[in-house]
Image: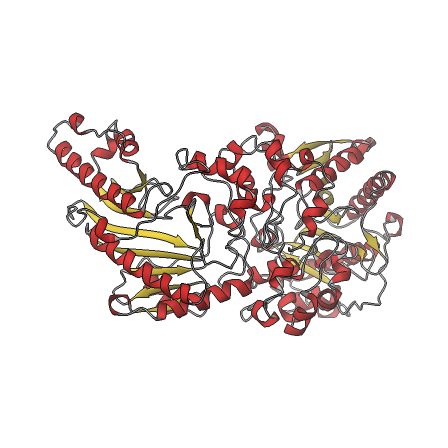
Amino acid sequence: MAKNCHNDYKMKFSGDEEFPDLSLHNNHMAKVLTKDIYNKLRGKSTPSGFTVDDIIQTGVDNPGHPFIMTVGCVAGDEESYEVFKDLLDPIISDRHSGYKPTDKHRTDLNFENLKGGDDLDPAYVLSSRVRTGRSIKGFTLPPHNSRGERRTIEKLSIEALATLSGEFKGKYYPLNGMTDKEQDQLINDHFLFDKPVSTLLTCAGMARDWPDARGIWHNDAKTFLVWVNEEDHLRVISMQQGGNMKEVFKRFCTGLLKIEETFKKHNHGFMWNEHLGYVLTCPSNLGTGLRGGVHVKLPKLSTHAKFGEILTRLRLQKRGTGGVDTASVGGVFDISNADRLGSSEVDQVQMVVDGVKLMVAMEKKLEKSESIDDMIPAQK
Amino acid sequence: MPFGNTHNEMKLKYASAKEYPDLSKHNNHMAKIITPAIYELLRKRQTPSGFTLDDVIQTGIDNPGHPFIMTVGCVAGDEETYEVFKELLDPVIQDRHGGYKPTDKHKTDLDPAHLKGGDDLDPNYVLSSRVRTGRSVRGFCLPPHCSRGERRAVETLSIEALDTLSGDLKGTYYALKNMSDAEQQQLIDDHFLFDKPVSPLLLASGMARDWPDGRGIWHNVNKTFLVWVNEEDHLRVISMQQGGNMKEVFNRFCTGLTKIEKLFKERKHEFMWNEHLGYVLTCPSNLGTGLRAGVHVKLPNVSKNAKFEEILKKLRLQKRGTGGVDTAAVGGTFDISNADRLGFSEVELVQMVVDGVKLLVEMEKKLEKGQPIDAMIPAQK
């Protein structure tokens, strides 16, 4: 058990003296954390030395976000979710619609179970994308890991990705050592991820040692992409222009399962358990870690009084086309599943496919100045 | 501390070479000094409060270099850091502080009567004068490492100590988190308010954690004596005023500082100090006196002279822009201050500023009249 000297040293101060000031805060952690919970957990440490102050630091340093309700805490390793369950279970429940500590999560990466999804109208649906994250068992997570761990993850990832073939054959571009030409190309493709500037990430320590052991892998066709060592060990992305979500999801599942096979062979499978599904750095990404979405033109529907309500009923969320921290531009929205935990990958992509189909139909009605009142769906 | 270094023992299962940082693009004191051998020796250690080698160097890894200044690239997390990691920090200190040896002794002199002159710098050229230093409170970890409980305890002690000041030093404490809009605006107008650090040099070492908890600004009624609590150091003490009367500024500085120190001693929390390193501060560049004494001075002609840099070097002075360490000069007005911190006393450093600025102003006047300054170039101090 790693000795966490500073945590022991801090124990000479009382819980009250160390309790953070959350009076101006609005995030899940600030809503859930009490002095009692803090007192109970402050003496603990995971085997690798992650403590409750490590978990909550990002939420203490980032009181609130203008567009989204942030989580305000991160995991430093797989054991964080167990050792600090008194804090994380209520946060998970709050964030994931009442998910209980006794609930079980179902994983379904069989793309054949998706119905339809190959016929979203490309006059409205500009692009389709599915992403998820994966953590590699036996290593600590990005807020906590050392350079040695990160480099080993990179090495294993490169090996795994090098075995992909056919439509998946591709190349790895380490951030450290990228030529200007490669960098420009990746920027033009909208693939390049930059050093995190979001304080949500930097306050949790995820930008340490940048750009050491970070990189981007993509296939020749640029439809399958893997980020190594950004916010999670791996982020896996399948994307293409137009509305054929079925094809995107098929490629996603196929590629992901192939990668997982290689990691398992090296005795480093992905972190997963039957309660939380795939274990990721941010509690908001537990379960499937999946965000399946489209960029879709909804200029009329988005200004309709019931737009927010429709999204809620469809279990979808809207974002700007620049990603999580942005606002929409010109009536084009990023529409994706709101849920991550408690429903499977197939369930979530199905909701996107069905929901977007309905919203495009609504948009067409509104274009003809027809009413959409009888199209408003029931709560899913 | 959420910066991944609480699991030092677990990291030891990786070979040193696997953990060694990539410093190929780096230009700071730490990157110049550290070697795989030093890293291997020190990676097993930690201070009693748990500060490790990776904690010391993280800021230098994350910040490869700075356009205007040679950065240090490492910080201390507590008083013991300078002892436990001496194999790295002694050479860094030596490199930064003009060859200062591990066996050298540092002299402290805060008697303002020892300063000669300094009350007659020409106010047509010298716009303002300022002296600052830092102090660390013994028994607490430093800003990169301290907990909320420690930071708040430092704040409480500081408020108690400052409340006892009287006469022209009597003042008020403004906690950053309780500040009203009106108070905030006033402090901004006075150029007193320090904001949440944005410099990546500070952010990468964890000094902005829990902002603005436990942080505040104290100043006297006349706004000539100012104390920052829990920014880059536990305390930063500043004496300043318009014009060129550095003697008065230094007098107030020494008087106030000595009074504050007395109060901390009475509460059994004296300042961190030892006879080798003088005052112990977060950044190795501030060891010794921690003192930067400077003026804002108009030198449009001298600053364009080919020998400007050489003159500054000989006078043991450095130039900065008027916005502070990270800025460039505007309109021929420079911030001129002492370059040294360690190995010279406070009086000696302020004397160098007073004498050096006096000479620079005379040179400026000569150049205004189209006269040469070659005969005035000083010898190396």
Q: Residue B267's spot in the image, x, y percent?
A: 85, 38
Colouring rule applied to residues: secondary structure
Q: Residue B268's spot in the image, x, y percent?
A: 85, 41
Q: Nearer the viewer, residue B296 or A220?
A: A220
Q: Quadrant of residue B13?
A: bottom right
Identify whether A237 is placed above or below B154: below
Seen at 29% across and 56% down, the residue is A253
Task: Determine if residue A135 is in view.
Answer: yes
Q: Quadrant of residue B17?
A: bottom right
The quadrant the N terminus of chain A occupies is bottom right
Seen at 47% across and 58% down, the residue is A137
Number of numbered discs overlaid on the protein picture:
0
Horizontal relation, residue B356 to residue A228: left or right: right
Q: Nearer the viewer, residue A210 or A80?
A: A80
Identify whether A309 is placed above or below B11: above
Q: Residue A349's spot in the image, x, y percent?
A: 27, 46
Seen at 61% across and 36% down, the residue is A38
Task: Determine if residue B66 is in view.
Answer: no
Identify whether B319 is placed above or below A291: below
Horizontal relation, residue A346 to residue A41: left or right: left
Q: Residue A109's spot in the image, x, y percent?
A: 30, 52
